[in-house]
Image: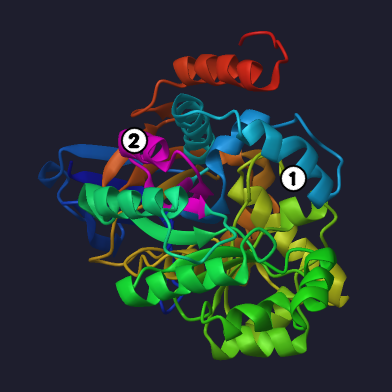
Amino acid sequence: MDILLKNAQIVTLNDNDDVIPEGSIGIRDNRIDFIGEGNGCIEAEYSKVIDCKGRTVMPGFVNAHNHLAMTMFRNYADDMKLMDWLFTKIFPLEDKQTDESVYWGSLLAMVEMIKSGTTTFADMYFFMESTARAAAESGMRAVLSRGLQGESGEEEPDYRLKESDELFRKFHNSYNGRIKVMLAPHSVYTCSEAYLRKVAAKSLEQEIPVQIHLSETKEEVSTCIEKFGRSPVKYLEDLGLLNDRTVAAHCVAVDDDDIGILASRRVNVVHNPGSNMKLASGIAPVAKMLEKGINVCLGTDGASSNNNLDMLEEMRLAAYLQKIYTNDPTVLPAEAVIRMATLKGAKALGFENLGSIEAGKAADLIVLNTERAHYYPKHNIKSAIVYSGNSADVETVIIDGNLVMESGHLVTLDEERILYKAQKWASKLTGQECPQP
């Protein structure tokens, strides 16, 4: 579809960080082919024209760490410590998940993400072909990974790695490049050294990027030091798992030496402030990491530990937390945190053609209603989005040049049916009957 967005305020996030007060964006063949001030373009050249008067257009958000189907456990197990939450509540329920429950849980997450302006996400879970099917239907851009756990590095059959191989074979760079696949060893505490070495070798041989939970809590770090004599960061470096294609989620409990290693290896770090706060995991030293040149982006983590997938909220939490953590209100300003939620996330996930509004780039755009009271008086649009905006402001979402939501109405997904199916499956998994929507 050829689309023209006219009369829009445009937050480009290009190299010059331009904000166009009023202009137009032309979309053709899934890409941005025109950006200009004023509205002197020929509307007749486009089959779809959207008037964005009083609206702001910006790049879609990139949620760089998630577990989509954990929407099934939202508000089920709250106010618990991470390891208790995982091992006594979440892991037992996850053993009951099926390909169909993951499919509907993934669709539920996609409804929420699209409606709050996320256009790209990274997921680590299982029954991932179900999530791939959901991503294909929704039109979202996705990086999918079969979560890997294991004790042995020997060559006997490993069903998780086999499922990961199948996922890569079937879906990597599929749907016009919208879907990519990574390897995803869960963590240093769920994978043996032999198993991690096996994954590292596969990543190197097949040039497949890796995402992993890393140094999420002090307990994880102290246990790793007790067992292996070094921090999780140093441990993974020795195993060959840290490089510029590695996406490390959390990195809360890292010291200066760890940060130096992450920087030298050019590891991409995903900050998950909402989840880290709720689980009392701590506050990642994002300011220090940024000072060292580390590519730090944002994620929500799963909806059972957040408990939403709202990247607008995540931006605000990230900015506020660093100011408190450093006792410096100038740290992580609005301009920086917007880039973490867009350009930097795209870079971490290997989508170099995303994250800013420039001719030739993929057309992943969102339209915000900035005529609402909380945007007035109008001074700095980027500050307004980060510190005043909310997910209800998202009106229209375009991914890969296609409309997936227009004027608040989902185009590709049947929201009512998804809510019904997700509730039915959640009740079945947890054994708790809940009223239907």
Does the magenta segment cover residue 121?
yes
Give the colour scheme shown. rainbow
14 lies left or right of 435: left
Mark yes or no: residue 339 visible: no
Residue under the point 73% across and 52% down = 274
Q: Identity of the amino acid at label 2?
A: Arg
Q: Based on the displayed image, in which of its 4 quarters is residue 413 positioned?
A: top left
Q: Identity of the amino acid at label 1?
A: Leu
Q: Which residue is mark 1?
A: 86
Quadrant showing the C terminus: top right
C-alpha distance separating marks 2 and 1: 27 Å
Span shown in magenta: 118-147
Q: Position of residue 397 (x, y in %)?
A: 40, 41
Residue under the point 46% across and 15% down = 417
81 lies left or right of 154: right
For label 1, the SS is: helix
Mark yes or no: residue 351 visible: yes
Q: Which residue is mark 2?
A: 133
Q: Nearer the viewer, residue 24 or 317?
A: 317
Q: Which of the marked residues, 2 or 1, is nearer the chain's N terminus?
A: 1
The number of numbered discs placed on residues in the rendered structure image is: 2
Residue under the point 52% across and 77% down = 241
For label 2, the SS is: helix
- Numbered circle sitting on residue 241: none
Q: Residues within 10 Å of mark 1 (few under 14, many from 20)?
A: some
